[in-house]
Every structure is written in structure tokens, then in C-alpha cells.
Amino acid sequence: MTTLPGGTWTLGDLTVTRFGYGAMQLAGPWVMGPPADRDGALAVLREAVELGITHIDTSNAYGPDVTNQLIREALHPYPESLHVVTKVGAVRDDKGGWPPARDPESLRRSVRENLVNLGLETLDLVNLRLGDARGPRPASVAEAFETLLDLRQQGLIRHLGVSNVTAEQVAEARSLGPIVCVQNGYNLAHRQDDELIDKLAADGIAYVPFFPLGGFSPLQSAALTKVSERLGAAPIAVALAWLLQRSPNILLIPGTSSVAHLRENIAGAGLTLAPEDVAALDGLDAAG
């Protein structure tokens, strides 16, 4: 078992490694259909657990159904220490789109499908996905979140989180019931959630960034490359290490369909950034 970078974090009563694994890339192209290499996908999941990862992020929308079924095939019965986190609030259409599905019946159906495909009686953590593919959109979370709170009361869900949300939506959800994490787009170059991350950290709530190296401008990419070359490390390694050092409540869920790449991500995230490197990287959000 590898010593994973970042240590652990507690999500309610769930202790997870801060370095987790995102299963989205295990599905086929455009997150649709089965993987080209099914045995390879199963091997990555098993390797993640062998390396000590206890936080796997998924959704029944991936495939759809595909990643959850792969997780079950590879890992069920699950080790007691392993916690699978899933998302509801969007589905897939025949064109590969992600239409919202946040009405009460759709949410109940999605929770049931996650339970069946993962082979569980209770989901450890369910994130309510809001907004759309362009990012968060202002809207009340009340009806959808209260539906999930009811399912939690029924024992089908242990903990709740929110995803692709504004700070106002986080506050509204918290006024209705407890959340243990927020999952939003965030990276070195796009740090619109800096204030939110710090507030959540003070309140003991995790922040899980997706797209850790997405959306860089050419100038920002060049700046990151310069720092990476000085450190003798890959840009993704620097970006992951910066996220882990940014705040103790940040949990990483980089995805890959390659065992070798999984190991590279773990090694990269363990990179220690000197204060001068952090200072250089902190300026990237304003570059360009």
C-alpha cells in the first residue's frame, strides 16, 4: 500500500483519503457506452484500492450505468474503508447531452439506480448536481435537496453534498440540512471559489475540485509549464500538488483509465512546492 499524498479528511463519519479517484473516464468516448478495454478499467479500480485510495467518485449518468457497474464488478463486496461517492441531478440523452433531472421522482429513481448498480443498500454520499455544462446557474435548491433529505431520512443515503453550485446555493442547502462537501470546477487558473473554499474549511466541509487542469489560456499554460520545468515535473503534477497544498479541505479525484497514469498522478500530487513556487503559481489566475 502506497502512502498517499495529503493524508485524510472526514466527511461526516466517513474518513477518506484526500487523494481519491474519479471514475468518469472509465466509460467509453464522451462518457458514453462501455470502455474499449474492460479488463483495463477493472484493473485501474482494483489498483486504486490496492494503493490505499478510499474515496471513489462516480455517477450513474456515466455511461450511463457503466462506471457504477464496473465499480461493482471490480470491488464488490467493498472493503469497509472504501467509500463510493455518487451524483444525481442529471442524466444522459441519446445525443450524449446532460439534461437536468432534479424533480423529486427523477432524483428518487436515480438514487435507486445507483444503489442497484453499485450493489449497495445505502449510498455513503450523494452530491446534488445543479447548473449545467457551462457551470453553476442561479436557482433554488430547496425542492431537490429536500427530496434527498427525505431519502436520507429513509436510510438510503448517509451524507449529502452539492455540485456545480454558487456560494448562495451552498448557503441555501446548508440552511435546509447538513452537507459534507461541495464539488465545483476549480484549478490554478480559475479560482472563483477561493473565498468559498476558505469558508468551508473553517466549517469543516470538504471542497472537491473537478477539471484540475482545464480551461487554461495559452499564457497561463506557458506560465505553468515554466514552473513545471524549473521543478522537473509534469504540469499536471504541479497542478495537483498545488491543489493539495491550497487548503486542507481540498480532496482530489483525478480520473484515468491507465494504471500507470494513476501511479503517476499519485506521485505527482506528492510533489512539495516551495514558497516561491506557490507564489508564482498563485498569480496564474490573473495571467492573460
Image (cartoon, grey):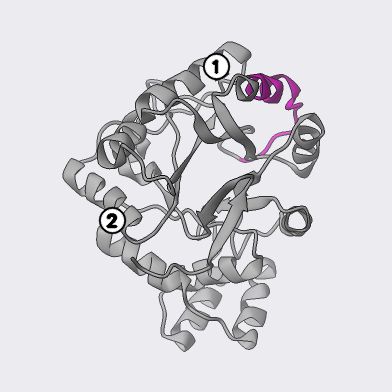
Q: Residue furthest front?
A: 80
Would you say residue 149 is visible in this rendering? yes
Where 271 sits versus 71, above or below? Answer: below
Q: Position of residue 257 (x, y in %)?
A: 29, 51
Amino acid bearing label 2:
Glu
Q: Is residue 138 left or right of residue 82?
A: right
Mark sitting on residue 84: none
Could you classify mark 1 by the number of other residues whose Cα lies within 10 Å: few (under 14), some (14-19), or many (20 or more)?
A: some
Where 208 sits versus 73, above or below? Answer: below
Where 287 sits versus 118, above or below? Answer: below
Q: Which residue is mark 2?
A: 47
> Could you tell me which residue is drawn at 26 percent across and 36 percent down?
73
The picture quadrant where one finds residue 248 is: bottom right
Where 222 sits versus 103, above or below? Answer: below
Secondary structure beneath dot 1 equals helix
Secondary structure beneath dot 2 equals helix
Q: Quadrant of the C terminus?
A: bottom right
Q: Quadrant of the N terminus?
A: bottom left
Is residue 175 magenta-colored? Answer: no
Q: Position of residue 97 (x, y in %)?
A: 45, 28
Would you say residue 288 is visible in this rendering? no
Q: Position of residue 175 (x, y in %)?
A: 82, 33
Amino acid bearing label 1:
Arg
Q: Earlier in the sequence, mark 2 or mark 1?
A: 2
Depth check: give the residue in front, 146 or 12.
12
The picture quadrant where one finds residue 262 is: bottom left
Q: Is residue 288 left or right of residue 169?
A: left
Q: Which residues are magenta?
A: 135-150
